[in-house]
Amino acid sequence: MSAKPVVAATDGSEESLRAVDWAAREAVLRGAPLRIVSAAAMLPRMMERRDDAGLAIVTDALAQDRDLALAAATARAAQVSPDLLVDADHLTGAPAQAVAQSGSGALMLVVGSRGSGAFTALVLGSVSRYAATHAPCPVVVVRDETTSAHRQVAVGIGDPETGAAALAFAFEEATLRQASLLAVHAWNTPRSEIARAFQALAAPGARAIEEQLTSKLAALLDDWRDKYPDVPVSQDVVYGHPGRALAGLSARADLVVIGRHPGPHGPGAVTHAVLNHAHGPVVSVPSA
């Protein structure tokens, strides 16, 4: 059994409970404990106290919602596997930073794509995006997940020099799931208009570029085939925006894996597109 836990964040919404379901199954798959966390949303300048009449104020209600969310999520995880070791913790501080930091020392952090209600949806959407781009561990954002298995893990390969962490995670998941692995590299030109795109594809140099990229991707995957001989591996080089290509692929893959690189301005265009438009679970893996 792994000593490192799988961490799942919840607010009690159905979206976050689906993330708990996913995290619980992943913990069972990896032989790891499950840690469920929840942060009470705190409005600016809100203080934790009671008024003179002893009536519960907003902070008490938020804390109660947090505790109820943890209880519901723990019960949900038990339905997945009664023997799963589950720990539930409440977080303090700003939700986005607290949830992201809860992934420290974890195998992965699992979050839902949004919460329930208009305000909560906005807040939790921000929390999920922040965690997916700042947590120190791989972060899985569960979107529209179904229990049907496609037996395929897809991984987006941008720069081969910085893609080792994402490839390692993808191959490990494929091994655990007894699934195939599809490595995808998407390339495009700065000119994104449809007419110009067709011109680029028809240009004499386009075929040479595609062949060169295909050769490089095959050479990169050869080393990983040697490390994971039981994983069927295929590759695809496509012309188009990487985010759209990977988001579309998510409809027929159990998991889409993308690399994450540190930057001061939040998620890049590819990460943003995949996280917002994917049809299933997406994991962002920090570069080593």
Image (spheres, helix red, strand yellow):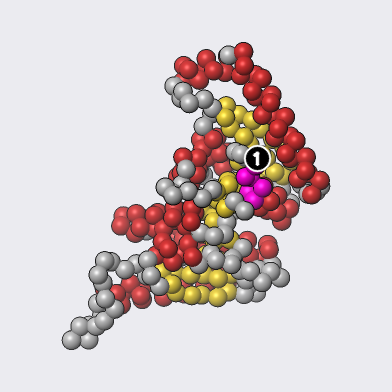
Percent x, y for residue 5? 61, 68
* Residue lying at 66% horizontally and 29% vertically, measured from the top left: 213
Main secondary structure along the magenta-highlighted residues: helix
* Residue lying at 68% horizontally and 63% vertically, measured from the top left: 30
Residue 129 forms part of the magenta stretch:
no
Q: Observer-nearest residue: 83 or 8?
A: 8
Q: Which residue is mark 1?
A: 160
Q: Amino acid at mark 1?
A: Pro
> The magenta stretch spans which residues?
161-166
Residue 249 visible = yes
Percent x, y for residue 4? 63, 69
- In this image, 48 relative to 217: left or right? left
- In this image, 254 relative to 131: left or right? right
* Residue lying at 70% horizontally and 32% vertically, measured from the top left: 216
Percent x, y for residue 204? 62, 13
* Residue lying at 56% horizontally and 39% vertically, measured from the top left: 246
Image-quadrant location for residue 140: bottom right
In the displayed structure, 106 sits above or below 200; it is below
Percent x, y for residue 82? 62, 73
Q: Observer-nearest residue: 251 or 187?
A: 187
- In this image, 63 relative to 101: left or right? left
In the displayed structure, 197 sits above or below 171; it is above
Q: Residues within 10 Å of mark 1 (few under 14, many from 20)?
A: few
